[in-house]
Image (cartoon, rainbow, N blue to C red):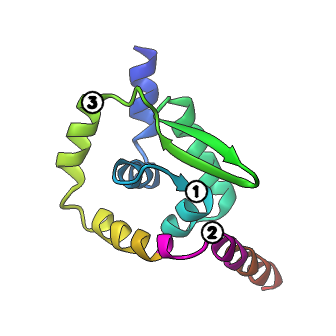
Amino acid sequence: MEQTLNIAKALADGSRMRVIAALMSREELCVCQITEMLQLAPATVSRHMTILHNARLVQSRKEGRWVFYRLTAVFPDLLRQWLTGSLDDVTQIQADRRRLETILACDPDDLCRQQKKRKKCRARE
């Protein structure tokens, strides 16, 4: 029962649900791509990803300085079916899919640099 509760709690947040929806349509995403899609601070995205990881919904791999996330191999099939049917017509999910197309066309190095510049600009304000 504890695992089921962890999954339910992990999915009880709109941002985390958006990440899962994005990962259901992609093999994997870099944390900078997820950050750009959600338009949240990197620390907030990191916290969301930790919650999803602890619920065993996502796994990560590190490649150099990049951290990539994907759904776990044991991601529940019934959950995937339910989410697919429930989220396909959601406006935010459709917008995320369009936004991801643009994000994935960017070089990850450039994306990361842009995010760091924005962070510095916000710090000056």
Q: Give the mark nearest the N terminus, 2 or 3.
A: 3
Instruction: Report the amino acid beneath label 1.
Output: Cys
Q: Residue 123 colored magenta?
A: no
Labels 1 & 3 near each other (Cβ < 8 A): no
Label 3 sits on a secondary structure element that is: helix
Q: Which mark is residue 30?
A: 1
Q: Which mark is residue 77?
A: 3
Which span of residues is magenta-colored?
Answer: 103-114
Q: Is residue 12 left or right of residue 44?
A: left
Q: Is residue 99 above or below residue 88?
A: below
Q: Is residue 50 above or below residue 116?
A: above
Q: Give the mark nearest the N terminus, 1 or 3.
A: 1
Labels 2 & 1 near each other (Cβ < 8 A): yes
Instruction: Report the amino acid beneath label 2.
Output: Pro
Cα–Cα span, label 2 and label 1:
8 Å
What residue lies at 63% left-to-right and 41% top-to-bottom? 61
What residue lies at 38% left-to-right and 31% top-to-bottom? 75
Instruction: Report the amino acid beneath label 3.
Output: Asp
